[in-house]
Amino acid sequence: MPLYYEEPLYRPPSEAGSLLIQATVGCSFAHCTYCISSVEGRFAIRPLADIRQDLAEARRLYGPRVPKIFLLAQNALAMPAADLLEISATAHELFPGLKQISLYAHPLDLLQKSRAELQALVAAGVTLLYVGLESGNDEVLRRVKKHTTAAKSILACRRALDAGLRLSCTVIIGLGGRELTGEHARDTGQMIAAISPQYLGCLTLMPYPGSGMDRSITQGTFEPLAPPEVLEEFRVLLENIGPLERTCIFRANHASNYLSLAGDLPADRERLLREIAAAQSSPGSLRPEAWRAL
Ligand code: SF4
């Protein structure tokens, strides 16, 4: 029997070689105004027996040498910790060389887990979370219905790091539109400094067709940034990422971005700022609008 997958499937680019296991479907928050989940709106936690069956089938298909598993879907950390521990135990039995289990998480999923549960997950091999923070500005978060605040996101991420998890955080350039661009960039940079995640990824806003934000753009109540304003937001963001507790691997090379940037923070900050300045004086070097994608 084939492994069960339910569209749409999203996984981080760095999980391209991972075994994908559908643990949940959709997103339990599903209100963010720019997101496909706010349009499609379904959330379900799959029965453990079905997930175990998929793991067993994957072992039959791919053998025991699976190094990494990514648990789908958009916030699989909404599952009870006990279920995640069982999945991890089964996965390690079937794949003895397994080095990492990772999944997407909303900041509130983290706050709903106790410190002991987070530590148990790390001990069981769930070691990397991809957390969509999107913005460090509360007004932006409120307008896009992200169901968190900057303070809650910082607390959630600090708790995860303290429990031994590694964090790959994502923020969205342009999420505040023209009206809130300065605040969004400044507060998001400061939030990243307060968290100090191991990885930071930047996307540039591309509202899902038919989403609330897409309609707001059509109605003229949300003004998206033009490419030069996106570059300026990147500059302000980077300048506001103050001292970090650990090296942060920074990537803005997703296809949604007009300019690809990659480096380690803080070591490469000046070089990244120079690349932004060069692009600001040479807008023809940016990715054309038609080539952008999510
Ligand atoms: S952005 Fe994330 S939390 Fe918000 S609806 Fe989409 S998947 Fe859910």
Image: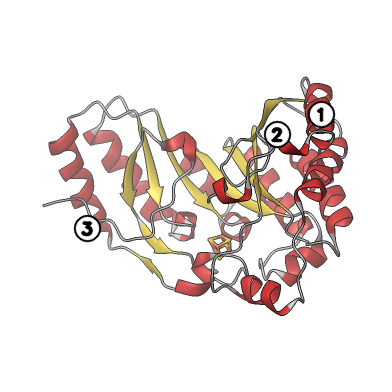
Percent coordinates x, y for residue 37 in the rendering = 50, 67
| First in residue order: circle 1 vs circle 2 | 1
SS for dot 1: helix
Percent coordinates x, y for residue 225 in the rendering = 77, 57
Would you identify the image quadrant in which residue 31 lies? bottom right
Task: Please give the name of the residue rendered at 84% of the width and 39% of the height, measured from the top-left corner.
Answer: 235
Inspect this view and state whether residue 123 appears: no
Instruction: Tell me the mark number nearer the camera, choosing from 1 and 2.
Output: 2
Q: Nearer the viewer, residue 63 or 180?
A: 180
Q: Which residue is mark 2?
A: 285
Whole-number angstrom distance, CA of label 1 to CA of label 2:
9 Å
Placement of 169 over or under 172, stated as above or below: above
| First in residue order: circle 2 vs circle 3 | 3
Which mark, by number, is residue 278?
A: 1
Whole-number angstrom distance, CA of label 1 to CA of label 3:
54 Å
Q: In the image, what residue type sits under mark 1?
A: Ala
Q: In the image, what residue type sits under mark 3?
A: Ala
| First in residue order: circle 1 vs circle 3 | 3
Task: Please give the name of the residue rendered at 77% of the width and 39% of the height, measured from the top-left corner.
Answer: 283
Q: In the image, what residue type sits under mark 2?
A: Ser
Percent coordinates x, y for residue 36 in the rendering = 51, 66
Whole-number angstrom distance, CA of label 2 to CA of label 3:
51 Å
Q: Are marks 2 and 3 in contact (CB under 8 Å)?
A: no
SS for dot 2: helix
Q: Nearer the viewer, residue 206 or 88?
A: 206
Q: Which residue is mark 3?
A: 49
- The residue carrying pointer 2 sits among few (fewer than 14), some (14 to 19) or many (20 or more) residues within 10 Å by Cα, namely few
Task: Please give the name of the residue rendered at 69% of the width and 38% of the height, measured from the top-left corner.
Answer: 286
Percent coordinates x, y for residue 258 in the rendering = 67, 42
- The residue carrying pointer 1 sits among few (fewer than 14), some (14 to 19) or many (20 or more) residues within 10 Å by Cα, namely few
